[in-house]
Amino acid sequence: MNSNTLSSTGTALGSGQLPRSSDLQSEQNLFAIPVLNHFLLYAPLSGLAALVNGVALLHLRDGIIDGPLSELMEALRANVRPAPRPIQGEFVPHFLGLLPTRDCNLACRYCGFQIAGGHHHASMPLTLARDAVTWYMDQVRQSGSRQAEVHFFGGEAFCAEEVLDFSVPLSRQLALDAGISVKFEVATNGAFSEERCRWAADHLDTVVLSLDGPADVQDLNRPYRGGRGSFQTVTRSATILSAGSADLYLRSCVTAQTADRLPEIADWFCQAFHPAGVCFESLQPTPQSEAAGLQPPDPLPFARGFIKAARLLASHDVEPIYTAADIRALRVSFCPVGQDVAIVSPDGVINACYLLQSEWEAKGLDLRLGRMSNRAACLDEGAVQAARDLNVWNKPHCERCFCKWHCAGGCHVNHQPADPTGAHARLCVQTRIIAVWNILNSLGRADLAEEWLADDEAVNRTEARPSDLLMDVV
Amino acid sequence: MADAQIYACSPDLVWLQDDNMVLLVDRRRRESWRLRGTDAILWTWTALGYRYQAMTRMLALLLGLSDNTAQVRVDEAIQAWHVAGIIEHGG
C-alpha cells in the first residue's frame, strides 16, 4: 500500500470507544468498495476512508497488519463514533409539521395527491392550528430546547394561506413569551400571487420551491389544473424569493427525459435565481406518472447528471442536495418517520409521515401517532414506538451496504431497497454511485472519481455487490 | 364603526418586515413608523387583503380574546394608524 493514499474524508469526528479490527468488522462498519483497480476502504463511523490495493485489502481482511497498514488501522480505530440509534424515551417533537390542506392548485402529471378523496381537501381549522402550535411550543419549552421549528407541507400549503398567516405570528408570539427562537419552512409549488410570495420571502426562514426546469419541462410536468403551464408564475415566485430573506431551495423532480439535462437546469437555476441549495430527486413512479408516460431516470444517467450539476452548483456556492448520499450525516431514518416529528393533518390526526395515509396504508404501514383532542396531543405510545422501529437497523438488505448510515434505507413507504431478485433497487444504485463519488472527492481524488464514473463497467462492479463489508471480500 | 370605513395608505408608503417588526416609510413626507406586536400582525394581514371580520376572528384566536375585545383592538390599531397619518379615509 502506498501510505500517501491514507487520508481522512474530512468529516466531523466524534468520540467513542476504540474497537479492535475484529470489533469494527463484527460491527459491520468497515467497508471495502472496488474502484477501478483500487479498493476504497470506508469507515463511516470514523469518518475515514482510504484507498488501498488488493494485497493490502486482503491483509486487512485477514488481520495481517504491519508496517503502513498498522498506521491505517490505528487511524480507523481512532475516533469511532457510536453507531446511530433510534430515539428512546419520551416523545419530544423534533419539529411540528402542519398540513394546512391536501388541496393543490396544480395537477402535476406524476402526483397522486390530486386523486385523494374529497375529505382531504378541507382546510385545517384555525382552532386546530392554534391547538397544535400551542401544544408544540409548550413541548419545546418543557424540553429545555431553545429552538422550535414549524414546517408546512401540503397538498399546496398556500391553498389554505390563512393557516400560515395565523400560525406564523402565533408561533412567534409563543416563542417570544418562552424565550426561544422559532424557524419556519414551507414546501410549495410557487404558484401564487406576488403579494403572497413577498410575504413568504420576508416571513419564512426556508422555502423549498418545486421547479422542475425550463418552461418545456415545468409546463409539461407541473401544469395547473386545466392544463395551463405554471412556468411563468413559478419563475416569477422564484425571482421574488431570491430577493427575500428566506433561504430558497429549489427542488427538481427528475424523469428519464430530463436526467441528461441536469447540468443545464442547474446552470439556469444559478443564472436566473439565488438559491441556497438545489435538490434533484428521481421521479417516484405512480399510476399517474405511468399514465402520463413519465419514467424514472436510470440510475447511472441520473448519477452522472447529478454529479455534473453538483459540480456546477458548487462553483456558484450553491449547495447540491442529494440527501441520501450525504456522507457528512449519520442517521437511522431518512425522513421524519421515527424522528419524533409530529405532522398534524387538516382533520387533527397526528402522523409520522407527510405522505397520504392511503399511500402508507397501501404498503401495510400505519404511521398515525395520535390525534389532537381537547387542545392537546393524544399520542399512542405503541404507535410512536412502531414509527421509531422503522429504521435502518431493521432493514436487512441494508445491513452490508456502505451507505446504510447515510441513506438509512430511504423512504419507508415508497422505497424497497431490493428488487425481487435481491439486487439493489434503482434508487439504491444511484445513491451508492453518488456516495462513492462524494467519498473519493473528500479524499481529494476527484481525478479517480472522474475516471471511475466514466467507466460503465467499473461503476457496475462497484454498485452491484451484495455486500460491501471488508470481511466479505473474496 | 371601523368596518364601515374605507381607508387607504399613501402610494408613497412602503414597508418591510424585520424581526418582529414592520418598518413603514413614507418617502414623500420623509416619515417612518415602527409597528410591533399586534400592530405588526394586523398590518401584515391588512396588506395581504384580509377583511375586517376575518382579522378580528384571527386576532381573537391568536390572543385568546373574545370577539368583541378583538374588535376593539383592531379598531384601536386602525384609529392609531389614522391619527399617525399612516392611513387616510379613502375609497
Image (spheres, coloured by chain):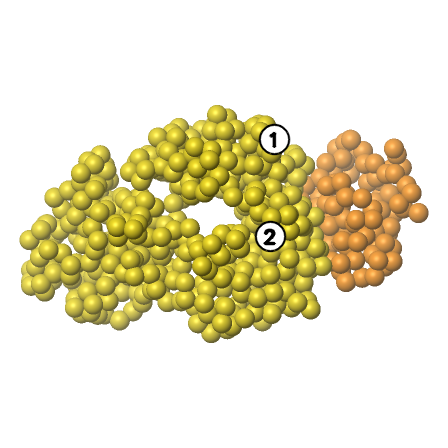
Chain colours: A yellow, B orange
* Secondary structure under the numbered disc 2 in the rendered image: loop
Looking at the picture, does residue A145 appear above or below residue B49? below
Callout 1 amino acid: Gly
Would you identify the image quadrant in which residue A136 lies?
bottom right
Q: Earlier in the sequence, mark 1 or mark 2?
A: 2
Q: Is residue A185 left or right of residue A170?
A: left
Chain assignment, label 1: A
Is residue B37 visible in the rendered image? The answer is yes
Q: Position of residue A279 (x, y in %)?
A: 43, 41
Of A126 and B39, the residue lying toward us? A126
Disc 2 marks which amino acid? Leu
Residue A100 location (% of width, % of height):
63, 51
- Looking at the picture, tell me which residue is in the foreground, A247 or A381: A381
Whole-percent x, y for residue A427 in the image: 34, 46
Please name the residue shown 74% across and 58% down the image: B62
Q: Nearer the viewer, residue A261 or B33?
A: A261
Q: Is residue A165 visible?
A: no
Tag 1 and tag 2, C-beta contact below 8 Å:
no
Separation of marks 1 and 2 at Cα, in angstroms: 24 Å
Q: Position of residue B45 (x, y in %)?
A: 74, 45
User: Would you call the spot at circle 1 few (<14 residues within 10 Å), some (14-19), or many (20 or more)?
Assistant: few
Question: Which residue is at 81% across, 52% downward?
Answer: B56
Q: Residue furthest bottom?
A: A89
Which residue is disc 1 drawn over?
Answer: A226
Query: Label 2 belongs to which residue?
Result: A99
